[in-house]
Image (cartoon, rainbow, N blue to C red):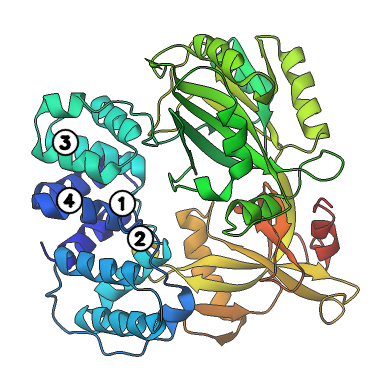
Amino acid sequence: MLLHDLVTATDAAASTSSRLAKIEALAALLRGLGPEEIAPAVGLLLAKPRQGRLGIGWRSLSSLEVAHDAASHLSIADVDAALTRLASTEGAGSVATRRAELEALASAATAEEWDFLARVMMGELRTGALEGVLLDAIAKAAGRAAPTVRRAAMLSGDLGETAVIALTATPEDLDAVGLVVGRPVLPMLASTAASVPDALGIAGEASVEYKLDGARIQVHRRGDDLGVYTRNLADITHRVPEIVEVVRGFPGGDLILDGETLALDEDGGPRPFQDTMSRFGSESASELALKPWFFDILHAGGRDLVDEPLTARLLELERVAGEWRMPGIVTSDPVAAEELSRAALAAGHEGVLVKGVDSTYTAGRRGKSWIKVKPVLTYDLVVLGVEWGSGRRSGMLSNLHLGALDPAGEFGPPGGFVMVGKTFKGLTDELLRWQTAHFPTIETHRSEYAVHVRPETVVEIAIDGVQRSTRYPGGVALRFARVKGYRPDKSPAEADTIQTLRALLRG
């Protein structure tokens, strides 16, 4: 199959807000793939190449100056081979070799195909081909039950391989995909609620547990072998010997544990998320230790637990993990649950997770079995620039550059604005149309990807917090920023300050 066909299908998926239409467009594409094309195509659809990290950054892509082909001839196999060469390039001369590979791929692609591939390599496809949609598309294309496909994907941890089995093998082969100690599985996800009582109203009797501002981990122990994996199933065992040592001391045979880890400060409080992630991703030794907390157990001593209710899994988790269990209580009392939530916040954590006691361990969609509750912070910021959108948002101004007021001139001219992040989350079609018409009227200049504007448009932004940043001059960046709405009633002088945002940093 040609890359052009895949790009066309992703454009069709991105151009509609209908989940059913997205599924049909992707299912039609999947039906036309050859067996050897399925796994590579799934990686491209999700902007997660099956080769993993390619060693390609925005600087490498933006500095390319090549003439693209006028006609489409690149196949999915051609692209897959090129990405394999990029991922395997290392050692002396690798920079020049990688650049030559990129130039060859870019010149063989049409302009439209290269825009698609560049976004794949940066993990920024934004086509609406989310994992849950693609799971349903695989089921539709293969004529299999969606829950069966979803379960196989969770237990195999590989959506591409699941698609291969679903589309080319027998129903019995798909049913046979099971839990294997040592092979990471897709993690169960949580939906959100505005308050603890709201969450309990959905879950009923529940395990209410601390929600840490840390990094998700999954730990497998098989005999003397231990593996620690990230939420994206990357193997980081060699980076976290302290976690390996903790789990090595747990009782009872083979294990699969789900949990979270973070770094603590001298007082035992959580360090900023960025500190944890820096330590989490470091390839070298560090004095900053990570502490694990475990909140679920999927396998213990030869017994798979994913289909057991949470109550049974928590009993087994208590026996195995003991003091390393996530703090929490089982209750249906909103008052008791609120008290635990306040304790979690007072200890510097994000909030709580509310989990129905009868729930099994599932993945794929954000169902109502696990519900996270954490306070939402809102701030009035000023738009400094807007990037042009892609896919469904092509031709529209989308990604906002956000600035905080710096009244004292600590990070620039007094009364100026300091950039603190970007977001396109929360923008409705109506807002996209409005800002595409509005921002060119206050434009100061343009770059290749953005329209820069006078700092006079105030927008209310919801965030989960901030983190330290060397990218922005104020040393702080927004976390999970999304648009709540524009504030024409407010002037830029009423915007929140960079000092207010910096005060959110711990330590």
Quadrant of res 245: top right
The percent coordinates of residue 146 (x first, y second) are 25, 29
Mark 2: few, some, or many residues within 10 Å (few <14, many ≥20)? some
Q: Residue at x 51, y 17 (%)?
A: 252
The percent coordinates of residue 338 (x first, y second) are 75, 20
Mark 4: few, some, or many residues within 10 Å (few <14, many ≥20)? many
**Mark toward the start of the polypeptide (2 vs 3):** 3
Question: Is the Cβ of the residue at disc 2 closer than 8 Å to that at disc 1?
Answer: yes
Q: Is residue 250 left or right of residue 429?
A: right
* Gap between marks 4 and 1 measured at Cα: 24 Å
Q: Is residue 225 visible?
A: yes
Q: Where is mark 1, residue-wise?
A: 16
Quadrant of res 217: top right
Mark 1: few, some, or many residues within 10 Å (few <14, many ≥20)? some
Q: Is residue 193 visible?
A: no
The quarter of the image holding the N terminus is bottom left
Q: Where is mark 2, residue-wise?
A: 392
Q: Is residue 134 left or right of residue 331?
A: left
* Gap between marks 4 and 2 measured at Cα: 24 Å
Q: Where is mark 3, residue-wise?
A: 166
Q: Is residue 135 above or below residue 109?
A: above
Q: Amino acid at mark 4?
A: Ile
* Gap between marks 2 and 3 measured at Cα: 29 Å
Question: Is the Cβ of the residue at disc 4 closer than 8 Å to that at disc 2?
Answer: no
The percent coordinates of residue 296 (x first, y second) are 53, 23
* Gap between marks 2 and 1 measured at Cα: 7 Å
Q: Amino acid at mark 2?
A: Arg
Q: Is residue 450 above or below residue 329?
A: below
